[in-house]
Amino acid sequence: MKIDPEHLEIGIRERLAEIVGDAGHNLDVNYRVEVGSTAATILNVAASLNPDLIVLGVRPSSGVLDRFMWPVAYELVRGATCPVLTIRQTQFVH
């Protein structure tokens, strides 16, 4: 099965809007879907947008993949020029 990137992006944008909900109506929320190295891509986009905040969803500990995921979060927090808010996945998944 071939993945349609446009369809995937629409689905992701809709899910992000759902997560933000009504709280986002008074905010300038930027929904972006990018492909690339996670930390570097987010930092590059943030550098172009000059955001006030980066919100990062993190998964609960799985043990196995933690050693691969924590360096991404660390790089984001270390390299960001604005605050980075991390939210555990269980807080925003219905």
Image: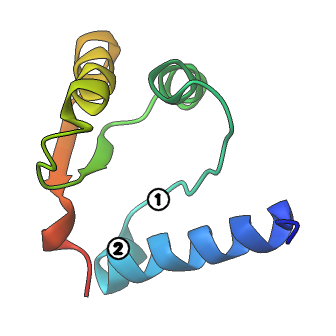
Judged from the image, the secondary structure of the residue bearing numbered disc 2 is: helix
Residue drawn at x 22%, y 27% as measured from the top left: 70
Q: Which residue is mark 1?
A: 29
Residue 15 spot, x, y in % from top left = 49, 77
Q: Nearer the viewer, residue 51 or 16?
A: 16
Locate residue 14 relative to residue 21 in the image: left or right: right
Name the disc covering residue 59, or none: none
Residue 44 spot, x, y in % from top left = 57, 20
Residue drawn at x 46%, y 59% as measured from the top left: 29
Locate residue 64 relative to residue 5 in the image: left or right: left
Residue drawn at x 57%, y 79% as measured from the top left: 14
User: In the figure, 54 relative to 22: above or below?
Assistant: above
Residue 69 spot, x, y in % from top left = 29, 32
Q: Amino acid at mark 1?
A: Val
Earlier-in-chain disc, 2 versus 1:
2
Residue 73 spot, x, y in % from top left = 26, 28
- Rendered image quadrant of residue 12: bottom right
Farthest residue to the front: give it: 64
Q: Nearer the viewer, residue 44 or 72?
A: 72
Judged from the image, the secondary structure of the residue bearing numbered disc 1 is: loop
What coloring was used for the rendering? rainbow
* Label 2 Cα crowd, 10 Å radius (few <14 / some 14-19 / many 20+): few
Q: Which residue is mark 2?
A: 20
Farthest residue to the top: give it: 79
Answer whether labels 2 and 1 touch (C-beta < 8 Å): yes
